[in-house]
Amino acid sequence: MIQMDVRSTRGRLAVFGLALAVTAVIALAPTPEGLALEGKYAIATMAFAGVLWVTGALPLAVTALSIPALLTAFGVFGDLDDALAPFADHLIFLFIAGFMLANALQKYDIDRRIALYIMARMGSSPRKLILAVMVATAILSMWVSNTATSAMMTPIAVGVLAQVVGRDELTEAGDDDLTTNVQVATLLGTAYGASVGGVGTLIGTPPNAVVAGVLNDQLGYEIGFADWLLIGLPIVAVTLPIVWYVLTYWLFPPEIEDVSGAREEARRYLREEGELSTRGRRVAYIFTATAGLWVLGGLGGPVWWLFETVGLSTDTANVLHTTLFGGSGPTLFGTEGGYQGLLYYVMVGLYAIPTLVLADTTEWEDLVDIDWGTILLFGGGLSLASGFANSGATRWIAETIFGSLTGLPIVVIVAAVVLLVIFLTEMTSNTATATIIVPVLVSIGGILAATLGLAEESAAIFLSVSGAIAASFAFALPVATPPNAIVFGSGYLEQRDMMRAGVVLNLLMTAVLTLFIWVLFQFVWPMFLW
């Protein structure tokens, strides 16, 4: 996000006053034709939050908490309970469970061990060492927040790079050094690997959950954990090697060949970790089982075929399938009607938390130390999205601003969405960007359905998922994403290098994502997502 000098009370009050002024101007302006009064007030609320999110005058979560209060004050919601209801969205609890699982992994340095193992195995050349850093970071970022992942990986990368340089410490940004390219490419690869890897799973980064929550709230459409893997993993598998290639072969080719010292340093770090304790192994088992059940919960069709293969009667198969995967038939518990299923991915995540405690691996003090700010930001975003949907504001914005896209080729529409989201994310957090733009993209689906050759729901899913993916590909500014900020804050990277790489990658990723999302849209998503 664009940070203003708001550290002083005076500066913070000035920006807050600006946010109030913008809100008042919109709220007092004549209501445009086709927009309900409540819709205008929802837009005013978005403007208030947008100014504070972009400037950073208040912490993102603090601004998010003001959203339901302001929506209720304006009368967009008649009851504060309705405005606060999105804070209890099931995906909120999926994120809570994911964060708590990640804390358990970090408590026993399991994430660090995985990263060091990959670096020790793969880092046989400068380019392979950078690739190892990026792969390790991306894999961890699928399960641990990209902020925590980059915070852990940056000092590891710095320590390993010191061995490449052959010094006790790395050269700080701004000083001349013959190995600058290795240094820059590795640190940028750490940040970009965290951002790209987060796309891989539903819990990898908040924009993924934002689009899932909005689609569920506005369309009643559920994207499950396994469903998202069909979207996220191909994106990661294609884009991560491209980012690595651009960094190491085009922008910052390494000037050295010998990285044996760095590889040995990774091995030394790994040896210092020692054997994983009994409790650590329990955490690894619980995490593996949870991830496996998350995937299994999306495989209802193959499991039904398995039930038939082993010779179960139709009635027994129906009962078992409904109990595990949900449905409207009878269950093993004797209940009938709508049933979510024992393997519903949010429930699986919630099972894992008491399991960690019962296995004597964590205490409440360990579990509670999670990123509550992101949770509150996510809830505030869903509240704003709900207010927009209920008031008709999203539909009006979609028709007014994006109606001109009707009739354009699909590729052009996707490119416009991807480029817009990447540009917006450079100025504000990717979660805030997704919160603002995804509800609009859902409404655009209804307008462009005929152009895309899809049903309205399918078009809404296609466009909103495209926007959520693009929100993780802002690479140019330190303030665009937490990984960028953390790596830049290490002091070993100049902003001009991030700008140089980021501008190139932003443009390249716009083209790559447009093409790849179109391919997925044509050949993969129709078989699984609609």
Image (cartoon, grey):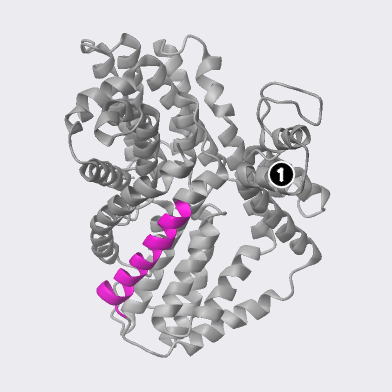
| Left or right of residue 286, residue 103 in this image | left
Query: In this orientation, which residue lies closer to the viewer: 168 or 156?
Result: 156
Q: Secondary structure at mark 1?
A: helix
Residue 441's x, y, as percent? 33, 33
Residue 518's x, y, as percent? 31, 48
* Residue displayed at 27% across by 41% down: 417
Query: In this orientation, which residue lies closer to the viewer: 40 or 394?
Result: 394
Location of the N terminus (image quadrant): top left
* Residue displayed at 37% across by 37% down: 464
Query: In this orientation, which residue lies closer to the viewer: 404 or 78?
Result: 404
Mark 1 neighbour class, 10 Å CA radius: few under 14, some 14 to 19, many 20 or more: few
Whether residue 132 appears in magenta in the rendering, the answer is: no
Q: Is residue 278 above or below residue 465?
A: below
| Residue 169 visible in this rendered orientation of the protein | no
| Residue stretch rendered in magenta on the structure | 232-253
Query: In this orientation, which residue lies closer to the viewer: 112 or 298?
Result: 298
Q: Which residue is mark 1?
A: 308
| Residue 149 visible in this rendered orientation of the protein | yes
Q: Is residue 30 above or below residue 356?
A: above
Image-quadrant location for residue 218:
top left
Tag 1: residue type?
A: Glu
* Residue displayed at 83% across by 48% down: 358
Location of the C terminus (image quadrant): top left
Secondary structure mainly formed by the magenta segment: helix
Q: Is residue 4 above or below residue 248?
A: above
Whether residue 233 appears in magenta in the rendering, the answer is: yes
Q: Is residue 37 above or below residue 126?
A: above
Residue 520's x, y, as percent? 38, 49
Residue 90's x, y, as percent? 59, 32
